[in-house]
Amino acid sequence: MTMIFSSCIGISIEYIVNKNFIGEGLYTALALTIIEFLRVRKK
């Protein structure tokens, strides 16, 4: 949950700074979040 929240903050800052939304960052963050979620769930 923390990773999702921090990813949203990072994407928001990127949007404010660049005035441009880069979807690649979203997909990367989403993939990392899913991997981390699955890793934690196995424990």
Image (cartoon, grey):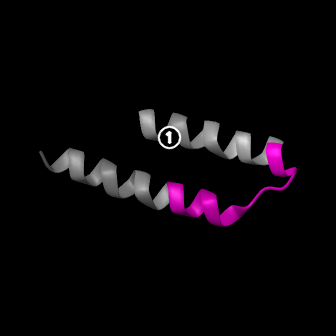
Q: Is residue 19 left or right of residue 42?
A: right
Q: Residue furthest front?
A: 17
At 83% from the left edge and 51% from the top edge, which residue is drawn? 18
Give the amino acid type for the residue marked by disc 1 in the picture: Ile
How many neighbours does mark 1 have within 10 angstroms: few (below 14), some (14-19), or many (20 or more)?
some
Q: Which residue is mark 1?
A: 4
Q: Residue furthest left?
A: 43
| Residue at (69, 63) in percent of width and height | 23
Q: Is residue 38 magenta?
A: no
Residue 20's image quarter?
A: bottom right
Task: Provide residue 41's location: percent of width, then percent of height.
Answer: 21, 46
> Residue lying furthest bottom in this view?
24
Percent of width and height locating residue 32: 42, 57
Residue 20 left/right relative to 5: right
Q: Which residues are magenta?
A: 17-29
Given residues 14 and 7, the one toward you in this image is 14
Numbered label tally? 1
Q: Is residue 36 visible?
A: yes
Quadrant of the image for the C terminus? top left
User: Percent position (x, y) of residue 8?
Assistant: 61, 40
Q: Tell me the element at label 1.
A: helix
Name the quadrant of the N terminus: top left
Residue 1 in sight here: no
- Left or right, residue 32 beside residue 16: left
